């Protein structure tokens, strides 16, 4: 009986000795996972286990903190990410990945001098570190130093010709410089390497819009939404493109999706305003008026046209009294807008206030002697000056 137990005892002893190493190897593998929650759990186990055993060297522990920081960054836990990046650098002053990631983090928070200092430290230690050149290029782009940005993106791509992110960020720099053909080429190169980059499809779609290629833009917006359906701005942009080409039902669907997904008041204002225009094009006048008025309560900035459209929409919907206040607001905020005064006149005329309407039309004509609508109103009323 004792003899039969002996092999089991050997196996138990072997497993007790092997398990910690196996667990560490598994955690080290999962710590580097692209799935952030798995990475955080595994890196945390490595860090906590070392607090008890103290077996890991500074550089090994530094890597675990940095990988966990990158995972926190993906989840938007920026304070935790920063704490891990700092800890990683303190544990290993030569961890170039941690220095570069810390610099990139500072860049994203607008701390550009801190960002540059850390990235330069990484490059001083490792002059052929492609990712550090990418991060420094992004920093230069943010500062508007595009020549320096291009040099860094070019260097990153020389070192790593398959770095899709370098192509996409160089494409954004070209976009900001209004070099749209170059931007289009870079976004296409990025997508050839990584066809699952939702943001890059969006960027390329915006280029197509600039080039007047609306159908191509819509196809790229479609791909971006298929990969990441919760990005409300992509729905907004695609809806605006549908509105531009006269596909009003599809535009309305996209603007409605924007409003369902958005957490941004300015985006809500734009979606209401654009959906109101689409409703108006379809002859749905009451829905148009309601949306155009809602837009005024959401948008952060307005133009005279926003108030004018809301006023006209209520007039078209048969409720000029409700539109009158928007016309009055337009003339108050934009007293030099001939169109605002002409709109006020049309609302007053619809309410039977002919004398006040004539005054408003004359004000429009005085501001712009070539304002045909104001002149036509006055001619019809036999009130030309």
Image (spheres, rainbow, N blue to C red):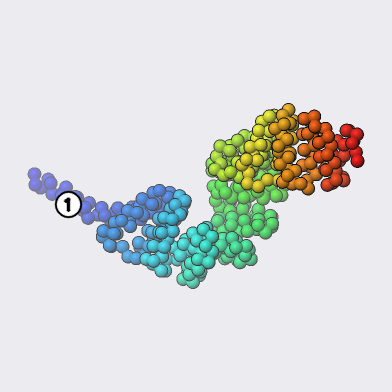
The local crowd at label 1, few if under 14, some if 14 to 19, many if 20 or more residues have their Cα within 10 Å, is few
Which residue is pictured at 36% across the width and 50% down the height? 41
As displayed, is residue 188 above or below residue 323?
below
Residue at the front extreme, as displayed: 355
Q: Going by the image, does 186 lie left or right of 337?
A: left
Task: Where is residue 63? Give x, y as percent.
Answer: 39, 61
Quadrant into which the N terminus falls: top left
As displayed, is residue 98 above or below residue 376?
below
Residue at the bottom extreme, as displayed: 124
Q: Quadrant of residue 186?
A: bottom right
Task: Where is residue 84? Give x, y as percent.
Answer: 40, 59
The answer to whether residue 50 shows anywhere in this view is yes
Which residue is pictured at 15% across the width and 49% down the height? 9
As displayed, is residue 104 above or below residue 202?
below
The answer to whether residue 131 shows anywhere in this view is no
Q: How many labels does the image show?
A: 1
Q: Quadrant of residue 217?
A: top right
Q: Going by the image, does 133 lie left or right of 315?
A: left
Task: Where is residue 149? Give x, y as percent.
Answer: 60, 64
* Viewer-side residue, 383 vs 40: 383
* Viewer-side residue, 53 vs 29: 53
Residue at the top extreme, as displayed: 318
Q: Going by the image, does 372 lie left or right of 156?
A: right
Residue topped by disc 1: 10
Which residue is pictured at 61% across the width and 66% down the height? 148
Which residue is pictured at 52% across the width and 62% down the height? 111
Task: Where is residue 6? Give x, y as percent.
Answer: 13, 49
Secondary structure beneath label 1: helix
């Amino acid at each position: 009986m004792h003899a039969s137990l002996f092999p089991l005892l050997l196996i138990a002893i072997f497993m007790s000795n092997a398990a910690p190493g196996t667990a560490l190897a598994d955690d080290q593998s999962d710590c580097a996972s692209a799935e952030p929650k798995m990475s955080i759990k595994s890196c945390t186990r490595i860090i906590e286990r070392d607090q008890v055993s103290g077996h890991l060297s500074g550089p090994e522990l530094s890597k675990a903190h940095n990988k966990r920081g990158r995972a926190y960054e993906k989840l938007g836990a920026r304070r935790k990410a920063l704490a891990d990046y700092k800890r990683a650098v303190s544990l290993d002053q030569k961890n170039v990945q941690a220095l570069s990631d810390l610099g990139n983090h500072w860049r994203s928070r607008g701390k550009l001098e801190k960002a540059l200092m850390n990235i330069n430290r990484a490059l001083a230690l490792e002059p052929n570190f492609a990712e550090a050149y990418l991060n420094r290029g992004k920093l230069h782009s943010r500062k508007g130093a595009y020549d320096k940005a291009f040099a860094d993106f070019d260097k990153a791509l020389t070192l790593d010709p398959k770095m899709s992110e370098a192509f996409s960020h160089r494409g954004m720099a070209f976009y900001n410089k209004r070099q749209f053909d170059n931007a289009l080429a870079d976004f296409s190169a990025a997508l050839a390497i990584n066809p699952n980059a939702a943001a890059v499809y969006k960027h390329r779609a915006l280029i197509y819009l600039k080039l007047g290629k609306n159908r191509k833009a819509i196809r790229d917006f479609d791909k971006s939404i298929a990969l990441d359906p919760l990005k409300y701005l992509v729905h907004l942009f695609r809806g605006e493109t549908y509105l531009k080409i006269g596909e009003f039902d599809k535009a309305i669907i996209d603007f409605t999706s924007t409003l369902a997904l958005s957490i941004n008041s300015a985006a809500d204002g734009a979606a209401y305003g654009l959906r109101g225009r689409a409703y108006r094009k379809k002859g749905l006048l009451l829905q148009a008026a309601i949306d155009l008025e809602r837009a005024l309560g959401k948008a952060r900035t307005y133009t005279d046209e926003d108030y004018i459209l809301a006023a006209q929409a209520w007039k078209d919907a048969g409720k000029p009294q409700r539109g009158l206040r928007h016309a009055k607001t337009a003339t108050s905020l934009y007293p030099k807008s001939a169109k605002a005064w002409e709109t006020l006149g049309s609302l007053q005329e619809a309410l039977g206030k002919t004398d006040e309407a004539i005054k408003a039309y004359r004000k429009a004509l005085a501001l712009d002697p070539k304002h045909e609508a104001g002149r036509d109103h006055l001619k019809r009323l036999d009130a030309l000056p």
